[in-house]
Image (cartoon, rainbow, N blue to C red):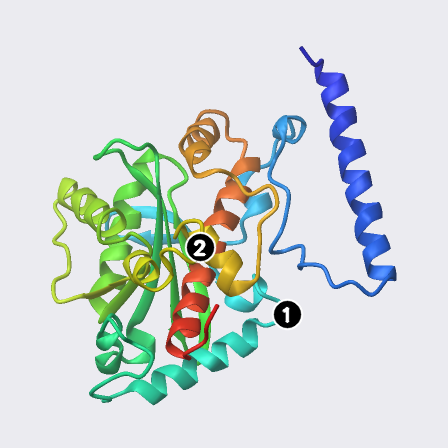
């Protein structure tokens, strides 16, 4: 068994080696992925460092009739510093170009027809994180991408403990009610039914008349047999040309959240928020790639 002292030393050496490698690549003119995209999740040594939620998430205490939660609101460019602004322009151009179009080009399976009837500021992308994998367990994080005043923004609704789920869902219901279409990845099977169930638990009505575009199914139709699988991060590597280093595994997220609630140490919440945000910006990039007629 590795002692805590040795584990800490190994972690320090690994980070030092990574810094030397990045410096060497920079000197050689090799462009590396921005640190905001590929970052190392909290390792065993790091977890022992105590961080308050205010230290790792710049947000505001958001009040609703059902209570409070933490709202984190950041522009997409924070996560894609090299091309976030260009992606926003592409999004605006795409949404303007498809309004009222009867038959969308580059939409062979008629997946994206709802976009022709959706204003840019009424389209939302969604990704959720729950406290477990059993139906009915509480949600603690809902991330959305929305267009606001000409800017794409990542908004993350975070319950800082189990009691804040009701307030989080109260605000999410308002966002859904304002939206005309939603984009997800496996959201027809997982995200939206899960949200509907949790809203029902608190007595909230789920907004009706919401068009839903699920990129998992469109990804399978387009790329099955051409990629090893059609998971989101596989599409991300193939389409967005971006990989992740040390991304927190999805199966580790519930335990990390429970540990945060139990101890108040938010060090791994940082990784969960980053994981969720990257999922969201990848959804936007994948939609643009598909509807701009690009090929793998």
Closer to viewer: mark 1 or mark 2: 2
Furthest toward the top, the residue is 1
| Image location (x, y in percent) of residue 63 | 34, 53
**Residue 235 picture location, percent across and down:** 45, 57
Q: Residue 82's mark? A: 1
Secondary element type, mark 1: loop
Q: Residue 137, percent across and down?
A: 26, 33
Q: Nearer the viewer, residue 65 or 268?
A: 268
Quadrant of the rendered structure where residue 106 is?
Answer: bottom left
Per the model, the C-alpha gap separating discs 1 and 2 is: 26 Å
- Confirm whether residue 209 shows in the render: yes
Task: Report the residue at 58% width, 45% height from top.
Answer: 56
Residue placed at 13% from the left, 44% from the top? 200
Task: Pick the residue in front: 26 or 225.
Answer: 225
Count of labels shown?
2
Alpha-carbon neighbours of circle 2 within 10 Å: few (<14), some, or many (≥20)? some
Q: Neighbour class for label 1 at 10 Å: few (<14), some, many (≥20)?
A: few
Q: Residue at x 55, y 45 (%)?
A: 54
Q: Is residue 2 above or below residue 213?
A: above
Q: Quadrant where the N terminus lies? A: top right
Marks 1 & 2, CB-CB < 8 Å contact: no
Judging from the image, what secondary structure is the residue with disc 2 in?
Answer: loop
**Quick one: 115 or 53, which is closer to the camera?**
115
**Residue 158 percent location from the top left of the image:** 40, 46
Is residue 63 placed above or below 259 in the rendered structure? below
292 sits left or right of 101 in the view? right
Left or right? Give the position of 230 relative to 173. right
Q: Which residue is mark 2?
A: 227
Q: Earlier in the sequence, mark 1 or mark 2?
A: 1
Residue at 46 percent of width and 68 percent of height: 285
């Amino acid at each position: 068994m590795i002692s805590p002292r040795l584990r800490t030393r190994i972690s320090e050496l690994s980070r030092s080696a990574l810094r030397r490698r990045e410096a060497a690549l920079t000197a050689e003119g090799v462009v590396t992925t921005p640190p905001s995209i590929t970052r190392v999740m909290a390792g065993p040594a790091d977890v022992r460092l105590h961080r308050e939620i205010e230290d790792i998430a710049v947000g505001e205490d958001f009040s609703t009739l059902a209570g409070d939660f933490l709202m984190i609101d950041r522009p997409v460019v924070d996560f894609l510093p090299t091309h976030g602004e260009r992606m926003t322009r592409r999004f605006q151009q795409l949404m303007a170009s498809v309004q009222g179009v009867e038959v969308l080009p580059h939409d062979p399976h008629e997946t994206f027809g709802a976009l022709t009837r959706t204003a840019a500021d009424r389209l939302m992308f969604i990704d959720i994180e729950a406290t477990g994998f059993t139906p009915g367990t509480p949600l603690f994080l809902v991330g959305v991408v929305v267009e606001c005043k000409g800017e794409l923004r990542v908004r993350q609704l975070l319950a800082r403990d189990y009691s804040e789920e009701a307030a989080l869902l109260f605000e999410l219901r308002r966002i859904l009610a304002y939206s005309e279409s939603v984009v997800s990845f496996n959201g027809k099977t997982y995200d939206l039914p899960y949200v509907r169930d949790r809203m029902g638990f608190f007595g909230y009505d789920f907004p009706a008349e919401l068009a839903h575009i699920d990129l998992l199914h469109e990804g399978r139709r387009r790329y099955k047999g051409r990629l090893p699988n059609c998971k989101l991060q596989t599409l991300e590597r193939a389409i967005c040309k971006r990989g992740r280093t040390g991304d927190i595994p999805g199966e580790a997220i519930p335990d990390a959240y429970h540990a945060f609630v139990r101890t108040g140490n938010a060090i791994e919440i940082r990784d969960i928020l980053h994981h969720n945000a990257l999922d969201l910006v990848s959804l936007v990039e994948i939609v643009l790639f598909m509807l701009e007629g690009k090929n793998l």
